[in-house]
Image (cartoon, rainbow, N blue to C red):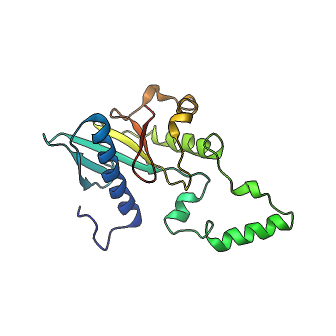
Amino acid sequence: MGTGGPAMTEKKRIEEATAEGFVTAYNALMRTSYRFDALLDPPEPDARCVDADGNSLCLEVTMSEDRPGDIKAQMGGSEDRSLQALKVHLDAVKAGKASIFDRVSSSTGNAGISMIQRLRSKLTKSCGPGVALVIRDTSGVDWDWDVVKETLVAGLDLSQNPYDRGIWILSRSKDRLFRLA
């Protein structure tokens, strides 16, 4: 599959950018030489990376969301996170019909719960050998996932982890990589 063409969907652009960011961070951390090679079509994982020796590392890519609906909003499928939606929410707060905390997230609260739910569904997928799961953090908050790693892992059954190359969280800015398993 080609990359970056006009027919490429937003989802595919995110998968490619995530794969490129992941291999940069992964190479620095693991002292490897992977580069993004191609986006793949289902039922294959989302992307393939290849190192200098021709070894493949496939990536299953997903995104985090602090609150349900964040991903849909980020992909342009919802106006729920727009400035207008925020103004409507603030008017409801002023009128006593909503709480300001309805739109607040924390890494140990709804963001962590959302991450665990997303990971549970991905742990049921069988991708075969040589695959890593990469969660692209989409939060506007620069979470330090190492702080809540134990809480996240405790909420998962990793005894049947299908990702033999690890489960990773890539920061929104693509400059930090957190390993969960």
Task: Identify the residue at image location x=49%, y=65%.
Answer: 75
Left/right of residue 98 with respect to residue 53 in the rendered view = right
Outermost residue, left side: 53
Q: 113 or 34, which lies in front?
A: 34
For the question of whether residue 127 can be seen, the reply is no
Question: What percent of the width, then of the height, locates residue 137?
Answer: 48, 50
Q: Nearer the viewer, residue 51 or 156?
A: 51
Q: Quadrant of residue 148?
A: top right
Compared across the picture, whether 52 is left or right of 4 comes to: left
Percent coordinates x, y for residue 47 in the rendering: 30, 51
**Can residue 100 be seen?**
yes
Q: Is residue 156 above or below residue 170?
A: above
Residue 46: x %, y % from top left: 33, 51
From the viewer's perspective, tell me whether residue 8 is left or right of residue 50.
right
| Quadrant of image for the N terminus | bottom left
Residue 2, placed above or below residue 84: above
Q: Quadrant of residue 90?
A: bottom right
Residue 10 at x, y percent in the picture: 40, 66
